[in-house]
Amino acid sequence: MDITSFDQFELNRQLLNAVADLGYTEPTPIQQKTIPISLGNHDVLGIAQTGTGKTAAYLLPLLMKIKYAQGKNPRALILAPTRELAIQISKSVTDLAKYTDLRHLVAYGGLGPKTQIETLQQGVDLVVATPGRFMDLYRAGELITKDIRTLVLDEADKMMDMGFMPQIRSILEIIPTKRQNLLFSATFGGRVERLSAEFLEAPVKIEVTPQASTADMVDQVIYDVPNFRTKVNLLEHLLTQDDFQRVIVFARTKTSAENIYKFLTRKVFDPGQVRVIHANKGQNTRINSMEAFKEGNVRILVATDVAARGIDVAEVSHVINFDVPLIYEDYVHRIGRTGRANRTGQAITFVTLSENYHVEKIERIIRMTVPRQPMPAGVEITETPFDEQQAMLREVDEQRRKEDPNFLGAFHEKKFKNTAAGRATQQAKVKAAKNAASRPKSARPGGPRSAGPKRNSSRGGKR
């Protein structure tokens, strides 16, 4: 039977009214497949990207099962890799459970546990948490797990990337073994497969798009860029175009994100139009920045991958990958921030010589070749500084060695000596040696001291 309406699910009127208030009319493919299976108490392995409606796909049946407030201890647990995603899930719980009396807690690190403990003591039905904070509350004796009957792992692939497996295994040991499990991941690599085999029991696998594919609503392009400075020039050119209305710029590191933010606010935009989020920013700053971006008060959000987890904004027009991610699945997560809720979006990636290696790996994962476009007219292409060029060539050598251990590389010692740069380096060494030889002994490093009191070198001498 084709499911074209939420009324066709076995959900109560309270949930259906909340769905209608949110403006949802037709269930997405992941919702069509997951909700009936989950309501039937089967374990679920869901392979779905962000923006496909997976949060409602597991929340609606979960809320239907716990139905109303009961007792003091939580009966369901949702684990998320980052505080941002946990907050986003918590907001969805609030929206979908608005006509029920269900109580929930969102628990994450970065702030004191006092308020979270007080909420637990008053009684909760559902906990949304990051693994670390969940274990902190459990060890403190504030979180009773004996009544948990449903466990959801959201973005399981990211949890493993972030090293949460020890905490997840600890949690699996302290919650009841008789429970329903749901695992969701954007990709289904070997690690996710092993995790699913470890804690799912005869799961129903639901894959609404080809594994690790990218959203059909996202137009992807690549610009070949020679160096960092030209990346900055290209970024400035694009962001000043009229159709770049709400943009997320992804950077690989905290330092890069901060530098991009400073450049944009100093040279391009009013500071009120740009925000930056990364791990060094305080929790409240990060939350406020994301809320301002969601509300449309901020036009550009500069972010690192971890800090941006949980951004769910339907109107993101463009995602710009200033750097190519080194965790290749993050490319799928990044571009999934646009093209949401049946809206089209564009994902643009800046690629230098040394980043082409990573693009090829990403293209294998997403099973498509991302088209390349020529540099837009008007973008200043700067000359690559010598040090930056050498660093990129060394990185290319390392990449080729990974593929072929016998490859010597452009920076193999004998090859380097025969290059212009190698000969110049050798000449400089010879000249420095001659200069050192011509200086008087007292002026050479390690030469005799010309002044100053003598020190007693014996261990018991005075100092």
Image (spheres, rainbow, N blue to C red):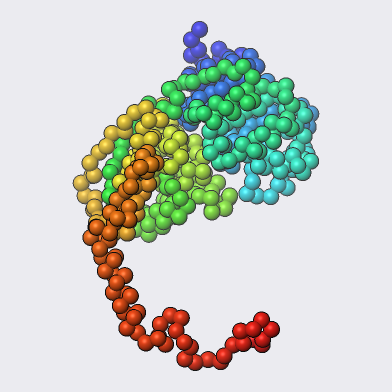
Using the image, determine if residue 73 lies above or below residue 402.
above
The residue lying furthest to the top in this view is: 1
Above or below for 168 versus 197: below
Closer to us: 433 or 268: 433
Quarter of the image holding residue 126?
Answer: top right
What is the x, y in percent for residue 12? 64, 17
Identified at 35% across, 36% down, the residue is: 360
- Please say whether residue 219 is visible from this viewpoint: yes
Tally of numbered tags: 0
- Residue 86 in view in this figure: no
Q: Splitting the image into 4 quarters, where does residue 73 fall?
A: top right
Left/right placement of residue 329 relative to residue 437 reads right
User: In the rendering, at what x and y percent does residue 8 appear?
Assistant: 55, 12
**Residue pictured at 32% horizontal, 56% vertical:** 413
Image quarter hosting the C terminus: bottom right
Where 420 falls versus 44 (above or below)? below
Residue 6: x percent and y percent? 54, 17
The image quadrant that residue 43 belongs to is top right
Q: Position of residue 375 (x, y in %)?
A: 24, 44
Q: Which residue is depicted at the point 64% across and 19% down? A: 201
Q: Nearer the viewer, residue 40 or 116?
A: 40
Determine whether, in the image, residue 3 is placed left or right of residue 149: left
Residue 122 lies, with reference to residue 452, above or below; the image says above
Q: Nearer the viewer, residue 100 or 328?
A: 328
Q: Which residue is depicted at the point 23% across and 60% down?
A: 420
